[in-house]
Image: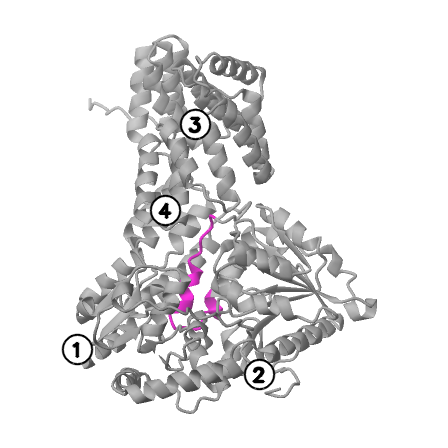
Amino acid sequence: MTATAPQPVSLDVALRQAVAHHQAGRLQEAEQIYRAILHAQPYQADANHNLGVLAGQVGQHAAGLPYLKTALTMNPAQGQYALSYAQALLTTGQAGEALAILQAAKQRGCNTQAAQALRRKAEAAMRNVPATGDAPTLAEIDRLVALFSAGSHIEMEGQARLLLERHPDSGIVWKALGVALRMQGKEALPVLQKAVELSPDDAEAHSNLANELQDLRQLDDAVASYQRALEINPDFAGVHGNLGKALRDLGRLDSAAASHAQALKLQPGNLKHAIHAHLLLPSIPDTPDALLAWRENYRTGIAALMDMPGALEEPGDDVVTSSFYLSYHNFNNCTLMAALCRFFRSRLPGLTTPSPHIANWRPPITRGQRIRVGFLSEYLVHHTIGKLYQGFIQHLDRNRFEVVVIRTAKAKQDSISQHIDALADRALTLPTRLEDQQQAVMAEKLDVLFYPDIGMTPSTYFLAYARLAPVQAVAWGHPDTTGLDTLDYFISAQSIEPEDAEAHYTERLIRLNRLPCFYQPLIAPTEIPGRVALGLPETGMLYGCPQSLFKFHPDFDAVLAAIAEGDPAGRIVLLDGLHYTAQLRARWAKTAPLLLERVLFLPPMPLDRFMALLAHLDVLLDPIHFGSGNTLYEAMVYGAPVVTWAGQFMRGRIVAAAYRQMGVNDAPIAPRLEDYAPLALALGRDPERRRSLRQSLREAADRELFADMQSVRELEIFLEAAVAAAGRGEKLPTGWKPDIPVSL
């Protein structure tokens, strides 16, 4: 006879055998099988839970904690897992952690008598903590959680501050205060650091600190904090995902992909992790070929996401599509952005919610009322968007228009935001949740919803999916199409668009006669520090490109290298972009090593010092493919000459258009890309031409660029015409222009 080999049993069968041993009191046999299961499948939830319970039964409660934590992480909706973990925490003297676990379980619907009894024990344990003042009651913790869930972050902050008067050493209250401050856009870093100091083994506290560090662009420190959180809880899927975002911003895309993949492994049905894993893009691409490969990955990533099951309940600010960087690639992005729109519409039905007031809406003129226009952005503060659009908010004719300023939940507060709010007829800040944001905008019953920018923050991007006003328009704050079918118009100008520009937008393109901006000129500093005081060399030509470094397309490297080679005594001056600088220098080491020696990076600086820098730069360089906007206006305060080349898309044609609007005949516009570097070098060698240009540019800017009331009048004409067309159930026709003379 031939012996038959024993057949391996399935994990399910093995688990049933282990449970049978466990229930019969054969704990050693049960433990052996549980461990064998976990050797084959480390994240099997029941085996982890039961092994953790078994450890407690033999008096090894601390040893059982990692298994109980893993079980709860894998299945947070399983109430028994929460109770077992909380009981072990309580037994090992971690009453505060136990309360947090029980509170989370209660939020998920686990409020059995056993859970209530355990909560009472944990609360009593915390009350009996001797005189350290670090034990808020369960009711107090409940209150903080309820305020957070309701989005009442101002009240949450106040409650936390009151609790800290009685419990100054409570890590959980410091953590709650830090979260409340973050959600309001206030300084939270010292508070979150205090929370970590008081609760060094709280993975969530380290994660919150890392999130704040990431927002502050202290990415290396953020990575360290995320990694510390994962040392405490290796199965914290959200931290793996956020670590991936930080690694992506550092240019470590392979590591970022691995982090997102691990997050997706821990939470297989989580579409947010899938989005981040499939939609990675570098901020500083290495080569044009690499850029093309990443774009293809992005296209196939959207297709892969479309094939995945599941839905998104709430996108929030933690859904990052990286689509912002597409605009810097020098390609038409309509197809990719429209595909992204289709994906999100298919997975988040709440995005499409229409405002009820639209159904019976009539144009304001028929109601004898003003047109109600909402300006919605996160950046109506001391930011490029605030500078470009506060003039429209101020100068729209109040006899015909009512202006509402709408800020997103994370919008900062500063002197510019306060000034803009004062200019508006009404100002409001939106709550945190998307549905609540939609309801808040709907309550305004707007006739026109105007987005100065879409694509720079998730909040405005996802809000724009909904039809919240009869007319919805976006402008050049982020100068690229949104791909959204709810955006009726893209506000641009005839002078900055190429002939075939309609094909670049999913929105209906509106070409105003003037640049769509009322820019109040800055007051130039009266005292300008010398070159050495600003960190500049005493001699030699200064070619400046003080722009965000992710504007530096790989094609620009050859232009900069030609300038460096053509003027050995000159220096190219850039602003340090921290992690972007390291990535750009790594690229130059392979593509243009001369730039490593000839480029001078200056640290970020306040506006007055930046303006002083502009005064010293001999020649400004407009980045190709995605050029200057706000910096152009700042440079024209001094008439500093900006060398430019009008590229294929509007986002690379703004400087040339401004020169044409100003009527400058001798403007330094290169007719071809290969002419760019020779033109910059010729201008550097010609001090008389630079002096003449400075004078003519300064005078022309004062006359034709700054404080442009004609652009305001043209926007008013557009708004009235768009509202009238909407009243007829139409859009303005392709090619529509405001019927106004080119100059007043």
SS category of the residue bearing label 2: loop
Task: Choose mark 4 or mark 1, whichever is in front.
Answer: 1
Q: Are marks 1 and 3 in contact (CB under 8 Å)?
A: no
Q: Are marks 2 and 1 in contact (CB under 8 Å)?
A: no
Q: Quadrant of residue 585?
A: bottom left
Q: Which region shows up in magenta? A: 318-336
Q: Which residue is denoted by mark 2 in the rendering?
A: 513
Identified by mark 4, the residue type is: His
Say whether disc 2 or disc 4 marks the residue closer to the N-terminus: 4
SS category of the residue bearing label 3: helix
Residue 670 percent across, percent down from the top left? 35, 86
Q: Quadrant of the image for the C terminus?
A: bottom right
Say whether disc 4 or disc 1 marks the residue closer to the N-terminus: 4
Q: Write the residue at 57% across / 34% down.
A: 158
Say whether disc 3 or disc 2 marks the residue closer to the N-terminus: 3
Could you say which disc has been placed on residue 568 in the image? 1
Q: Write the residue at 51% across / 70% down.
A: 476
Identified by mark 2, the residue type is: Asn
Q: Quadrant of residue 362?
A: bottom right
Specify whether residue 658 is in view. yes
Q: Which residue is denoted by mark 4 in the rendering?
A: 260
On screen, residue 683 versus residue 437, left or right, reads left
Q: Write the residue at 47% across / 37% down.
A: 178
Between the residue at mark 4 and the residue at mark 1, the CA separation in whole angstroms equals 45 Å
Between the residue at mark 2 and the residue at mark 4, the CA separation in whole angstroms equals 46 Å
Q: Are marks 3 and 4 in contact (CB under 8 Å)?
A: no
Instruction: Please tell me how crowded label 3 is: few (under 14), some (14-19), or many (20+) other residues with Cα within 10 Å.
Output: many
Say whether disc 1 or disc 3 marks the residue closer to the N-terminus: 3
